[in-house]
Amino acid sequence: MTLVDTRTPNPKNFVAGATGDWEVIIGMEVHAQVTSESKLFSGSSTEFGQPPNSNVSFVDAAMPGMLPVINSECVRQAVRTGIGLKAKINKRSIFDRKNYFYPDLPQGYQISQYLDPIVGEGTVLLDMGEDGTVQIGVERLHLEQDAGKSIHDQHPNMSFVDLNRSGVALMEIVSKPDLRSSGEARAYLSKLRTILRYLGTCDGNMEQGSMRADINVSVRRPGGEFGTRCEIKNVNSVRFAGQAIEYEARRQIDILEDGGSIDQETRLFDPKSGETRSMRSKEEAHDYRYFPDPDLLPLEFDDAFIAKMAEGLPELPDEKHARFVRDYGITPYDASVLVSDRESADFYEAVARGRDGKLSANWVINELFGRLSKDGTAIGDSPVSASQLGSIVDLIGKGDISGKIAKDLFEIVWTEGGDPAQIVESRGMKQVTDTGAIEKVVDDILAANPDKVAQAKEKPTMIGWFVGQVMKASQGKANPQAVNEILKRKLGI
Amino acid sequence: MTDLTKLSLAATRDGLSNRDFSALEVTEAYLGAIEKANPKLNAFIEVTAQQAREMAEQSDHRLNSRDARPLEGVPLGIKDLFATKHVHTQAASHVLDDFKPEYESHVTQNLWNDGAVMLGKLNMDEFAMGSSNETSHYGPVVNPWRAAGSNQDLVPGGSSGGSAAAVSAWLCAGATATDTGGSIRQPAAFTGTVGIKPTYGRCSRWGIVAFASSLDQAGPIARTVEDAAIMLTSMAGFDPMDSTSAEIAVPDFAAAVERGVKGLTIGVPREYRMDGMPEEIETLWQQGLEWLKAEGATVKDISLPHTKYALPAYYIVAPAEASSNLARYDGVKYGLRVSGKDITDMYELTRAKGFGREVKRRVMIGTYVLSAGYYDAYYVRAQKVRTLIKRDFERAFADGVDAILTPATPSAAFGIADQDMNADPVKMYLNDVFTVTVNMAGLPGIAVPAGKDHRGLPLGLQLIGKPFDEETLFAAGRVIERSAGGEFSPEKWW
C-alpha cells in the first residue's frame, strides 16, 4: 500500500530525544477471532477451552483429499464488521493460500485473502479528549484461518500440537499508519474492540487470544519522511500495546541519535521485561508464495446481501454517543464512558429513559460503575438493576430523598435488594419537607445556641453550621433546601 | 463356462441381473485373474479380497431379493489416489506409508452406493505425476500389450497406468482413474481402453488426494464406451463438500451412447497437426473423421490458436498447485516420518525420502514459479494463457462445433525405462500435448481406441466436448468404437 500521511503533527505527541523531537508512526494489524459456532472452512466447533485436539475435523487436520467449504456465517460477520467500520464492502473477493511450513499449520498453507479482501477502506474515530476526535484509516479487512498451537513443555525432546484453533476464522483488520502515540494506539485498540463487541462479530477477549495485534512502529522527525518500521508481533493486551510502542519508539530513537539505522525486522514484546526483542530480520522473512486457492471459488455476493446485513446491525458507539449527548443532555465525556460497551450503554439508557439524563448519568457512572469496579463485578452481574437505580433516581427527583440518603439507599439495594420506594417508606428514610416540623427543630437549635445566632448575623456563612445541626437532628431526612430557607428567614440574613 | 472376466461391464451387470452367475463368482474370477497376472503386470498395489467377497455376497443377497442397484455386484479397481476407508490410500507414494483414511471419497462412495464391489487399489504414478506409471513407489506397471513379435515390456501410460492395465488385462470390469493433464486418456489410448475425463466439476474431488486442484478430475477407464458411460453415471454428481463441484443434474450417460452423430459438426483443429507427428497418427485421425462423416456428421476445420502455449502453461499451473497441495506431507501428522535434529531437519529428511524424483521436480518447479519476483512472469502469465485457451474452445463451440476430434497421444506405448524419456523430462511431458488443453479449459474429453500402429499397438482418438456435454462424446465415441471394429484386447502373455 502507498503510505499517505493524513495527520498534522501534534507537538503533544512528540517524543523528546537528545537531538530534538521525534514523531512516532504506528500502524496496526489486528487479528480478531470471528464469533461463529464453527470454523471458517469446516464444521468443527470453535468452543474455547476444550481438551487438546477435540475440535478437529479431517479438514482441520489436513487429511489427504479434504477440501475447504466456506462457512457463510463467517462471511456475514466480516461484512457486518466492514459496515461497522464504515468500510467499502467488496462484492467479489478471493481466498489465497499463504504457504509456509510449521507443525501447527497442518495444510502447509494458511487460507487467507491477499490481493482481493472482502472489505476495503474504512475509518475508526478516536475520542482523544481535549485533542478532539482523531480519524484513523482502515486499509482493509480480510478473512483467514487461525493456526493451531505448538506445545513445547510436555515432553523432554518432542513438541505437541493442538489443532483446536486450526482453521478458526479470523478477521485481520489492517489500519493505515495513522496513529501517532501509544495513547492513540491504545485508544484505537479499545475502540476497535468496542465496535466489534457492539457488532457481536468478535468477543474481543484479548486474554483468551481472540483479539491480538501486530504493531508496526517507526519514528521520524516531526512531519518528515516515514522511517523504517519494525513489526511487533502478537501483542495481546491494550496495556502491553502501549508499553511495547513506548519501548520500541525509544529504542529506535536511541539508535538513530547514535548515528545508526533501523533494520526492518519482526520483533516480540516481552511483558515481563517490558522490552521488545528481535525475532527475525527482513532477510529471514518468509516468501509466502501467495496464489489463489484453487479449492475455493471467488467469494461473491450482491448489494441486497450487504443491505440485509446492514439492516440487522445495532446502533454503533459513535452514533449512540451523539444521540446520548443530544437526547439526554450529558457531556461528551460521560457519553464516551457510557458507550464504551454496549451493556453499560443499554443500562444507562434503561435508567435515563423518561428521567433526568444528567442525574441518571451521574448515578450510573459515579455510584454504579464505582461500586462495580470496587467489587470487581461486571455490569451484567450488577446486584442493582436498571429499574432499581431508575427508581432511586425517581426518589431523588421527586425530592423524597436527598442525595446523601440516596447513597445509603443504593447501598441497601446493592446488598439486600428490594424495591427502593418501599425501602424508603418502610425504613422512614423519606425526606422531611413538612416545614412545620423543620421549623420546630430550627427553633430548638436557635434557642439552644444564642451565641452562634449572634455570630451568624455578623457572618452569614455561619448558616452552614446551623444547617449541619438541623440535618443531624433530623437524621438527614430534612429537606436541605427547606432548612436553608427557614434558617435564613429566622436569622434574618 | 465362459470366462467371466472377459465380459464387458454391461454384460456382467446384465448377467448378474439375470442370475446367470453370482456376484461372488464374478469376484472370484477377477481375484483369480489378479493373483495370476499381478506379479507380471503390477497393476494392483493392494488387493482387498476379503472385502470384495463380503461386498459380493451382499450384492448377491440384493440380486436374489430383486433389490439390485445400478452396479450391483460389478467388481471394480480403484486408483490409489481415491481415499478408501480403512484401505491403503497412498497415491503410490512412500510419503504416505501405511496411511489408511477414516473416510471414503465421494466418487467411490457413489460407486459402493450403487452396489459395485471393490477388488483393490490400483498402481499409478506417484501423486498422479507421470505419463508412464514409472514414478510409482511400487514400481512400474507393465502394459498388457506388446508389440508384434516383441517381448519388450511397455508402459501403460500414466498416471492412471494401473487402472488402464487392469481393465485391459481383464483384472477388473472397470476402474476409477483421475486426469489432471491426460492421466485418464493417455493410458486408455496406450492400452486399447476407453477413458473419459468429464467436465471439471462433474465428479467431486472430495477424498481424492490432490495433485493440481484446478485441473484434477475423476473419471472411469473401461473396456467399452458403454461401460464408461455406465460408470460415469454412478461416479458423477454434485457434492456440497467440494466448492468446485457443479450443481447440475447427471444424465443417464448410457442412454446417449447409441444416439449417433447425424447432424453433428465435428471440429478439426489445425494446431493439433504437430511437426514430426507419425504418419500413422495422421492417418488414424483422417480415418476417424471419415467414420464420423459416414454416419452423418459434418467435419469442419477450426483453429485453436493458443494450443502451442498449453503444455508450457500447464507445467506452470499444475506444479504450482502441486507444490502447495503436497506441503501437508511433512511427517508431522501421518505417513512417513524421518526424525531429524529439529523440525526443519525432520521436514527435509521426510520429504527427501518420501517423495520420488518426479514429485520433487514438480514441487521445486511449483515453488519457483510462485516465488516473489517470478510469480507474475510465470504463474500470472500461465493463468492468462489458460483463459485464452478456454476462449479458443468457446469460440469454436459458438461457431457451431459440437465436438472436436484429435489424436489422443503423439505415439503408441513406449518401452519401460525409455532412455530418451528418462534423459529429458520434457519429452515425457510431450505425451500430454493433445490432452492438457482440455484440462486447462475444464472441458470433457474421451479417448477411444481407433486403430493400431505398425507394430500392432493400440492407438486412440480423442473427442473434446462442450462443458457438461459428455453425452455427445459418448455418442461420437461409440461411432468410432463401432467403426474401428477391431479387437482391442492384448494377447495374453502373463
Image (cartoon, coloured by chain):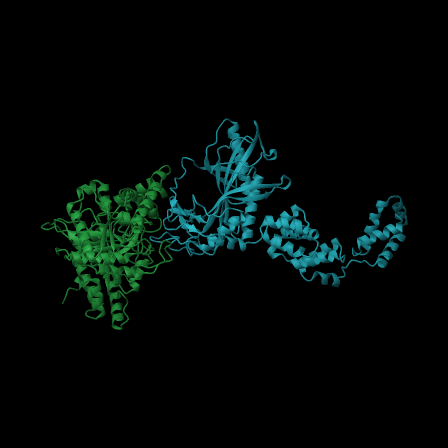
Q: Position of residue A42 (x, y in %)?
A: 41, 55
Is B190 in front, or is B297? B297
Is A258 in front, or is A36? A36
Q: Residue furthest bottom?
A: B65
In this rendering, position of residue B291 left or right of residue A142:
left
Tell me which residue sits at (21%, 42%) in the image.
Answer: B427
In this rendering, position of residue A26 left or right of residue B345:
right
Q: Position of residue A201 (x, y in %)?
A: 51, 52
- Residue A182: name its quadrant: top right
In this rendering, position of residue A152 left or right of residue B253:
right
Is B420 in front, or is A383? B420
In this rendering, position of residue A353 left or right of residue A489:
left
Work out whether residue A84 can be spotted.
Answer: yes
The color chain B is rendered in: green
Q: Position of residue A35 (x, y in %)?
A: 49, 53
Q: Position of residue B148 (x, y in %)?
A: 10, 51
Work out whether residue B352 can be spotted.
Answer: no
Chain letter, colour cyan in render: A
Is B401 in front, or is A162? B401
Q: Residue furthest left?
A: B149
- Residue A221: name its quadrant: top right
Total numbered labels = 0
